């Protein structure tokens, strides 16, 4: 009898764990250029800093290559919530995000001032290119 209850608990726990790890389908964006209309659903999902592409984009724009990026994992939720993780596993509330106008993404952290970026997508929505008002780039890649 004890084995039956134990087995039931183990299988229930595994089911809950697997269902918690399952991620929603993400909407991959088409390749876009500055000024193209973006849909909020394109940004929903998990994103990772891409140091190499960020460095390349900044170098090509004549800026110093940003190589000192912390390894960050961002989750943009449909509700407009923005979560952050240093491990890619445990996420914590970090602030809010929103798409404004055609291609402007506003990132509003819980602490600090909001930052606006001009956004575009490359590689069929795998890479999100964010350019700030100073012309510097941050490139996020999907890490789902």
Image (spheres, rainbow, N blue to C red):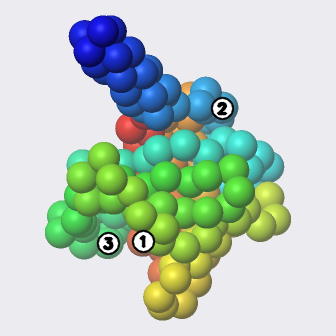
**Disc 2 or disc 3, which is closer to the eye?**
2
**Upstream in sequence: badge 2 or badge 3:** 2
For the C terminus, give its image quadrant.
top left
User: How far is mark 2 from mark 3, CA to CA?
Assistant: 31 Å
Name above or below for residue 142 compared with residue 129. Answer: above
Q: Which residue is mark 2?
A: 27
At 45% from the left and 28% from the top, the residue drawn is: 16
x, y percent for residue 78:
69, 50
**Upstream in sequence: badge 2 or badge 1:** 2
**Disc 3 or disc 1, which is closer to the eye?**
1
Q: Determine whether the residue tagged by mark 1 lies in a helix, strand or loop.
A: loop
Q: Which residue is mark 1?
A: 136
User: How far is mark 3 from mark 1, CA to CA?
Assistant: 7 Å
Which label belongs to residue 63?
A: 3
Name above or below for residue 17 compared with residue 47. Answer: above
Name above or below for residue 4 compared with residue 6. Answer: above
């Amino acid at each position: 009898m004890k084995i039956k209850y134990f087995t039931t608990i183990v299988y229930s726990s595994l089911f809950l764990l697997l269902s918690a790890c399952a991620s929603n389908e993400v909407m991959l964006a088409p390749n876009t250029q500055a000024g193209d209309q973006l849909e909020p659903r394109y940004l929903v999902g998990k994103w990772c800093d891409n140091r190499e592409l960020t460095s390349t984009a900044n170098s090509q724009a004549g800026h110093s290559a940003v190589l000192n990026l912390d390894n960050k994992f961002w989750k943009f939720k449909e509700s407009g919530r923005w979560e952050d993780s240093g491990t890619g596993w445990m996420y914590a509330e970090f602030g809010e995000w929103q798409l404004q106008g055609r291609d402007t993404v506003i990132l509003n952290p819980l602490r600090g001032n909001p930052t606006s970026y001009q956004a575009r997508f490359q590689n069929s929505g795998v890479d999100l290119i964010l350019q700030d008002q100073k012309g510097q780039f941050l490139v996020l890649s999907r890490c789902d």
